[in-house]
Image: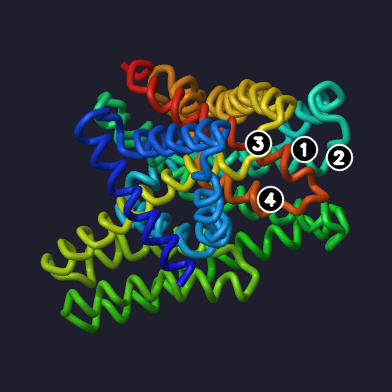
Amino acid sequence: METFNAIAVLITLAAGFAYVNHHFIKMPMSIGLMLISLLASLGLIIMEQFDLPVRIYADYLIGSIDFTRVLLEEMLGLLLFAGALHVNLNDLDEQKLEIGIYASFGVMTSTILVGLAVYGLSYWIAPGLRPVDCLLFGALISPTDPIAVLGILKKAGAPKALETKIAGESLFNDGIGVVVFLVLLRFATGEADMSFGSVAALFAKEVAGGAAFGLGAGYAAYLMLRSVNNYQVEVMVTLALVIGGYALASALHISGPIAIVVAGLLIGNQGRRLAMSDTTRDHLDTFWELVDVILNALLYVLIGLEVLVLTLNQSYLLAGMIAVPVALLARLISVGVPVRILRRWRRFAPNAVIIMTWGGLRGGISVALALSLPDQCQRELILTMTYVVVVFSVLVQGLTIKKLVR
């Protein structure tokens, strides 16, 4: 009942905030919802200074929701499938080299650069951080979340190839980033030896296993879709593919996010073209668009409310403000170096590096991974740093990317 009440309050808040944003603020929904939620949370913190007991109920609401479990186990697969379902494989195929490099080399380069920079600055900003803790922060802050920015890019008239790069990269770098984080976490907690062989084996199992599983599960669902012509059944098959497939992939200790992205690409292209009627395609698109909108609304409201669980320590906040330019510089290098090399053979939109750097917003995955850290990994410090970077990226980068593109 506690969980049901928390979800009821959360959905009500999301609907109310969405209404306020649509009628009065008129920001892109994800950005507007996060801003309103953040302001509401800060208002509760201020009211607490006047001995008003509102914070107790807010803490109860946030405490009854396991943000990490809700996002990484229950929401992420649905969000990734909804995104992959509308990605054209032909567009993706034209950009596959760039996307593959950004999602693998880019994430790992950013992880290392952020880790080294934070460790180098830790003497002044956060004494006691171990090298592996700094790398953990680098891994969780490197995946990008394009949800808030893709709609803005379309309205600003950004080149289609650039949109495909950003969308394709984010679909796969979420999975790669989570795998890198989990591998590092095993070393940080002493569950595994940090040798090259063990790292390579864990990484290969998670990534290659996830891709193979997603292909198999997606093809099985495709065969079912092709053998029936009933949109209710077909929508249920795709829902079962996502929820059941993600749960089974996690139980097999392979990457659920990568599995669902691969399955979503297969269903969204091969399945859409060869296994569905026009009626099914319309209903399937409507269903997954609604799932995407509702879950993103809940996600950004949750991110805004999570400020209530932060330790508002002055030195932690300072560390977070220093982490903002560090994360941006690492993003610039991890995107800029591949583009500089690939320009000899591939064409890129003007100022692609600047737009991809500023448009690389961080979102719920970063916050969820930070919340999953044990105390021995400087959890409170890393969580505060992560939150500051996420808030800056969504509110500042998200609100200025349209002007930058134009």
Instruction: Say whether residue 280 is left or right of residue 66.
Output: left
Q: For the residues carrying marks 1 and 3, which lies nearer the camera in this image? A: 3
**Mark 1 or mark 4: which comes first in sequence?**
1
| Residue 123, horizontal then vertical, whole percent | 87, 25
Q: Dot 1 corresponds to which residue?
A: 134
Determine the image quadrant of residue 378. Answer: top right
| Alpha carbons under labels 1 and 2: distance apart | 7 Å
| Alpha carbons under labels 1 and 3: distance apart | 14 Å
Instruction: Give the residue at x 42% y 25%.
Output: 348
Q: For the residues carrying marks 2 and 4, which lies nearer the camera in this image? A: 2
Type of amino acid under label 3: Thr
Q: Which quadrant does the N terminus fall into?
A: bottom left
Q: Dot 2 corresponds to which residue?
A: 130
Instruction: Give the residue at x 30% y 50%.
Output: 293
| Residue 132, horizontal then vertical, whole percent | 82, 43
Above or below 247: residue 383: above
**Mark 1 or mark 3: which comes first in sequence?**
1
Q: Dot 3 corresponds to which residue?
A: 384
Above or below 333: residue 64: below
Most extreme residue toward the left is 279
Tell me whether circle 1 and circle 2 mark residues in contact (CB < 8 Å).
yes
Q: Dot 4 corresponds to which residue?
A: 181
| Residue 70, horizontal then vertical, whole percent | 51, 60
Q: Judge the density around disc 1: few (<14), some (14-19), many (≥20) Cα neighbours within 10 Å.
A: many
Q: Secondary structure at mark 3?
A: helix
**Mark 3 or mark 2: which comes first in sequence?**
2
Type of amino acid under label 2: Arg
Determine the image quadrant of residue 322. Answer: top right
